[in-house]
């Protein structure tokens, strides 16, 4: 498990910059001598067809890449040792420690309202999370590659002390 | 179909302005609330958490309602030009919504209700730091807003069905499948904004049904706490309602771009078969994408998680390929007049597109695992709501003010508002993206590092943005007070 933060941010910023440049260039084109709509439109529609296929290709590839990394687990990843997590206003009951390099499962539930069980690695990156719900148990399969102390923060708004709702466990 | 004369439409214009002025005033007020929240997160001011979360509840619920009001008024006026509408019904919807907003204000300001707009069962009732009446006032307020919304959606649906010949005509079925025959029959296709009205009415009624169901269930629980609800059921309904309601603000406000941008560009934006099909897709995907709000509920049937990702991706196609692309094509090498109005409409397309990319990233399940409920979420939705929907609304307001007064704003005013709203806004948004990527959670009155440091420079952006909004407001008042000129419609 690792955080995607930096890569995601840069990917997004590059896409945003490209859009800004293209849209600015289009805005600027209004200062050039204008061209009749009947001429611009057919050209634009040809371009649009290419744009549609390009986007469709990106969407299909993104979906295919994402599929194997869906976090919901399968028979293999859900068969390891289970550790119970109970969330409540405003704290978590967690195990003292869990093993590293072993597929384990957190069984996450809540005693009162909806909370979020957000796992922060020793470097402070959010690496995984699952909702902690009353009356339900969410099973989060996870394998820790790095030993150390992991902080848990609440990631679902749960009331006045939501921001200070924390827990933690050691990965050994 | 009757073509109303300018005089006939004075009463309709009054209705539109009532909605627009109420909505935009609420927006202005809640922008200051937003600034206060960001400044509190920066540690500049001290607000106790109870008040912070009450303000957050007010800001979230109120901003969406503000945009909905503006969309309703403008779209109502556009559709009224197609087929004269009953004004009494429009006023009834308006009054219901205003009463609902008053209920929410009462619950939040004196009452400090702070369960967030999502009021996720059983939060409003467990560990509440506010009085019981405030919960009731909030729920009743939301129900009144929903009632007004239902009235409006019903009127819109009736209007499009009568104006274009039932669902078949309003959807543009024959236009798409019997194109030649349709052209020869001389029948008129619905204008682009009418598709927005149709989709908003249908998905809006679905969203209202879900909202009313969960709202009434919560009210029953409020009256008799022994009636228990299923938390997962409530969560699904809440997000179906909230996602759809908020999402529709875009599809209402895009009607303003369809209607006004071509007038600035001196070109035409007509309904093509592709545009009709794009709106069919929107009709479907606006109502199915909400599953992405429950990605982190592993007990949700897994098939729905796949539906959520697919629908979220597909929802991007109509805007990316048809509407935003079409808007850019309309502007390209056109003799467009740059005014406050056209600047806002065009910039809104940019915000919508960029925010959409932020949303798609977050709608990818494995990435959602480390972005869900971080500041990445307010980052992307403020991009298309604040720098998208709100700009469409401002663009529409200025289009009306400019045509009414025959005046435009000076270059200096345009630069000032542009730097304020786009420049300041970009800094505010960037703060959320950076903090979200650094795993800072959303909805934290006091954030872990690096939250507060980022909040400081983001707050400066928010201040610059608010200054831009003030300049914009002053300019709008100036144009509104100028003498009306006769315009050939
Ligand atoms: C004028 C500039 C604005 C500022 C400075 C601002 C600021 C904020 C802040 C600080 C938050 C809390 C974020 C967090 O820490 O979780 C927030 C949340 C939110 N804002 Fe804004 N905002 C602005 C405009 C808007 C607009 C135009 C809309 C909608 C049309 C909007 C809708 C929302 C919603 C729905 C939330 C979520 C509330 C919740 O988490 O329950 N905001 N905003
Ligand atoms: Cu919490």
Image (tube, coloured by chain):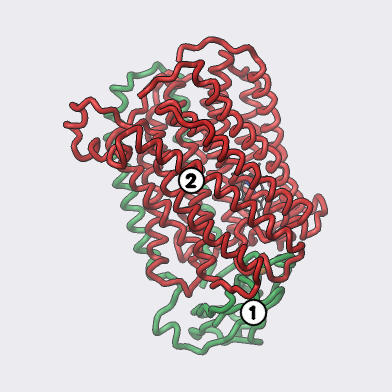
Q: In the rendering, at what x and y percent does residue B483 appear? A: 63, 12
Distance from mark 2 CB to nearest ligand 1 atom below 8 Å: no
Give the side of residue B371 with respect to residue B467, left or right. Answer: left
Q: Residues within 10 Å of mark 2 (few under 14, many from 20)?
A: many
Q: Is residue B408 above or below residue B78?
A: above
Question: What's the residue at 58%, 58% (across, down)?
Answer: B437
* Left or right relative to A90: residue A144: left
Q: CA distance from mark 2 to mark 1?
A: 35 Å
Q: Please provide percent x and percent y for residue A107.
A: 54, 82
Give the chain coloured green: A
The secondary element bearing badge 2 is classed as helix
Using the image, name the chain to which the residue with label 1 belongs.
A
Q: Is residue B207 or residue A77 the one in the foreground?
A: B207
When the figure is inspected, residue A70 is found, relative to residue B479, above or below; the finding is below
Q: Between residue A115 and residue B151, name the one nearer to us.
A: B151
Residue beneath disc 1: A111
Front residue (pair B84, B316) = B84
> Marks 2 and 1: CB-CB under 8 Å?
no
Residue B290 on image: x %, y %: 46, 58
B253 left or right, relative to B304:
right
Q: Is residue B15 visible?
A: yes
Tell me if residue B391 can be seen.
Answer: no
What crowding class fits label 1: few (fewer than 14 Cα within 10 Å), some (14-19), or many (20 or more)? some
Chain in red in the render: B
Badge 1 marks a residue whose secondary structure is loop
Q: Residue furthest right?
A: B46
Q: Residue at x 42, y 54 (%)?
A: B287
Where residue B272 sits in the image (x, y, percent)? 29, 33
**Residue B248, label in figure:** 2
Snapshot quadrant of residue B131: bottom right
Q: Quadrant of the N terminus of chain B?
A: top left
């Amino acid at each position: 498990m690792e955080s995607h933060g930096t890569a995601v941010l840069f990917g997004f910023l590059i896409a945003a910059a490209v859009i800004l440049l293209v849209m600015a260039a289009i805005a600027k084109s209004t200062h050039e001598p204008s061209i009749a709509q009947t001429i611009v439109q057919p050209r634009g529609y040809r371009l649009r067809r290419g744009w549609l296929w390009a986007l469709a290709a990106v969407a299909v590839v993104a979906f295919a890449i994402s599929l194997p990394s869906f976090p919901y687990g399968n028979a293999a990843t859900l068969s390891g040792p289970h550790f119970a997590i109970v969330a409540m206003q405003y704290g978590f009951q967690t195990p003292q420690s869990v093993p590293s390099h072993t597929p384990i499962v957190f069984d996450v539930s809540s005693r009162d309202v909806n909370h979020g069980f957000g796992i922060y690695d020793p470097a402070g990156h959010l690496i995984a999370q699952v909702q902690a719900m009353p009356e339900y148990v969410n099973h989060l399969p996870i394998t820790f590659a790095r030993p150390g102390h992991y902080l848990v923060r609440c990631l679902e708004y749960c009331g006045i002390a939501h921001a200070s709702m924390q827990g933690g466990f050691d990965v050994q | 179909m009757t073509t109303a004369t300018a005089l006939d439409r004075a009463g309709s214009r009054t209705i539109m302005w009532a909605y627009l002025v109420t909505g935009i005033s609420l927006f202005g007020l809640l922008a200051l609330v937003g600034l206060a929240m960001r400044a509190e997160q920066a540690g500049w001011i001290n607000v106790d958490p109870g008040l912070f979360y009450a303000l957050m509840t007010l800001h979230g619920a109120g901003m969406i309602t503000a945009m909905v009001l503006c969309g309703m008024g403008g779209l109502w006026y556009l559709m009224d030009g197609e087929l004269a509408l009953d004004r009494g019904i429009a006023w009834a919807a308006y009054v219901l919504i205003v009463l609902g907003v008053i209920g929410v204000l009462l619950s939040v300001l004196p009452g400090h209700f702070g369960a967030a707009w999502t009021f996720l069962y059983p939060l409003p009732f467990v560990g509440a730091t506010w009085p019981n009446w405030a919960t009731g006032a909030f729920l009743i307020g939301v129900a009144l807003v929903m009632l007004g919304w239902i009235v409006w959606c019903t009127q819109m649906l009736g209007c499009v069905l009568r104006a274009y010949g039932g669902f078949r005509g309003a959807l543009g079925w024959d236009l798409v499948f019997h194109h030649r025959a349709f052209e020869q029959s001389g029948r008129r296709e619905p204008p682009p904004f009418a598709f927005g009205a149709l989709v908003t009415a249908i998905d809006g009624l679905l969203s209202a049904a879900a909202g009313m169901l969960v709202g009434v269930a919560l009210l029953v629980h409020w009256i008799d706490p022994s009636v228990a609800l299923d938390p997962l059921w409530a969560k699904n309904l809440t997000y179906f309602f909230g996602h759809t309601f908020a999402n529709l603000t875009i599809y209402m406000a895009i009607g303003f771009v369809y209607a006004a941008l071509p007038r600035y560009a001196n070109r035409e934006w007509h309904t093509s078969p592709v545009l009709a099909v794009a709106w069919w897709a929107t009709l479907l995907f606006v109502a199915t994408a909400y599953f992405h709000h429950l990605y982190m509920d592993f007990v949700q049937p897994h098939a729905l998680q796949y539906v959520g990702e697919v629908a979220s991706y597909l929802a991007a196609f109509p805007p990316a390929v048809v509407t935003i692309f079409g808007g850019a094509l309309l502007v390209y090498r056109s003799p467009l007049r740059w005014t406050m109005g056209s600047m806002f409409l065009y910039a809104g397309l940019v915000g919508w597109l960029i925010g959409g990319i932020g949303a798609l990233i977050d709608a990818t399940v494995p990435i959602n695992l480390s972005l869900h409920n971080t500041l990445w979420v307010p980052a992307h939705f403020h991009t298309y709501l604040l720098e998208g929907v709100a700009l469409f609304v401002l663009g529409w307001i200025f289009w009306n003010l400019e045509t009414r007064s025959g005046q435009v704003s000076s270059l200096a005013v345009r630069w000032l508002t542009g730097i304020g709203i786009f420049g300041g806004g970009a800094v505010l948004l960037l703060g959320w993206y950076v903090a979200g990527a650094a795993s800072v959670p959303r909805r934290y009155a006091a954030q872990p590092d690096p939250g507060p440091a980022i909040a400081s420079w983001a707050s400066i952006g928010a201040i610059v943005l608010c200054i831009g909004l003030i300049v914009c407001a002053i300019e709008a008042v100036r144009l509104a007070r100028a003498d009306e000129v006769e315009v050939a419609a």
